[in-house]
Image (tube, coloured by chain):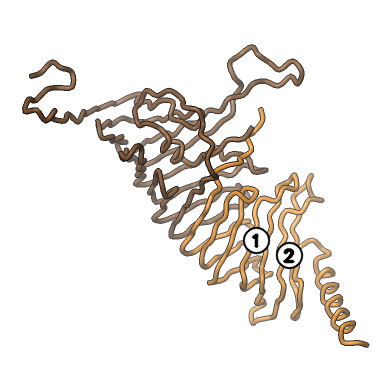
Amino acid sequence: MKITGFLFGLLVLANCSPAWAQTNAPAKKTAEQLLLITSDSGYYDGLTNRMVYIGHVFVTDHANGKLNCERLTVDLPPDGEHPTNIVAETNVVVDILNKGQTNHITANKAIYAYHVVAAVTNLINAMTNVVPAVTNETITFTGGNPKYKSPDSDVAAEPIIIHIAAQSVERVEFPAHVEMEWHIKSSGNGTNTSPFGILK
Amino acid sequence: MKPGAKKLFSTALALSFFLLTLEARAQLVPVGSGTNLSSVMYCDPPHDQQVKMRLTGAEMSPLPNATYDVKKLEIQQFSASGTLEAVARAPQCLYAPMDGQASSAGHLDLTLGGGKIHLQGEGFLWQQNESRLIISNRVSTVIKMGSWNVPTL
């Protein structure tokens, strides 16, 4: 089984709507996408198989999203396996371009976690005795009063957790300390109608 | 002796010399100039037959303070299972075998993740004992987003 795309969900997020109640869209088959990371300096630790980028770290795929931070740590599992842990630290800013609109996430820290877990099912391949597996991907934004800004609303919460499934945003979770502000636009007909149709 | 045979003999002699210096499986302490520099580190027991790191260079010439000017440096790092984890290449560097360090103000290429991650930078310091490669300036990485192996349960 192969998957395409991983890093911080930049590409993952970019293929998705920003709303926080999404259904998974089937993965699109596209040409191999390249992700670019630049920084002032960095180091590779061969003992831990870890790459660390330091100073003015910038991550982009040139089309759909970008990330800025001061320190980015990528743990590389052996044998070319999917990275399981990526951490962006200090002044983390993520911009995701989606359908011509930019969604903006800020925090002091962002943690991408990827795990393969056994599927909750009784189905086991009788021939191979293989337990079905599913991937569990999350991006957790913490510290520095994390904020999620979309054209429709601003949300502050601690933490902000983005759940990813099948290369799409499954949902965005605001588990605690939520403050939400809606951007109410004028209808343009001279009346100040509310989005809920209550206030006139 | 014909010129070609003489050159071959000289190369073989230089290579043999370096192979002898590597026999102890310790840090390389070469003497003199030569070609086909090679230094190998092995894993700790119980994988002590497995190569952990290999340093090679096409040419080397001695400099003061027990350092060497190495051309076409290549450093390979392997996992305990023998998988190639990282390959670093530099057109030129200074190698200090007594300190276990290689450094350069020049260009560096680093490949990780089975070729999925390609990194470049300007200026580096490689610390052999710590297995650490520090890239000083203008770090740039390109990651191929597909084809990751999914860990098995």
Q: Name which of mark 1 and mark 2 comes first in the sequence.
A: 2
Quadrant of the image containing the N terminus of chain A: top right
Neighbour tally class for label 1: few under 14, some 14-19, many 20 plus, Cα within 10 Å: some
Examine the rendered structure and indicate whether residue B51 appears above or below residue B138: above
- Name chain A's colour: brown
Examine the rendered structure and indicate whether residue B73 appears above or below residue A184: below
Residue occupying the point 50% across, 51% down: A52
Label 1 element class = loop
- Tag 1–tag 2 contact (CB < 8 Å): yes
Residue at mark 2: chain: B
- Name chain B's colour: orange
Q: What residue type is labelled 1?
A: Gln
Q: How many labels does the image show?
A: 2
Query: Can the viewer see residue A104 in this picture?
Result: no
* Left or right: where A155 falls relative to A29: left
Q: What residue type is labelled 2?
A: Gln
Which residue appears farthest toward the front when viewing the image?
Answer: A189
Q: Where is residue A90 in the image (x, y as percent from the top left)?
A: 37, 47
Q: Which residue was labeled with disc 2?
A: B27
Q: Which residue was labeled with disc 1?
A: B128
Residue occupying the point 86% across, 79% down: B8
- Give the CA separation, mark 1 to mark 2: 9 Å
Q: Position of residue B77 (x, y in %)?
A: 68, 54
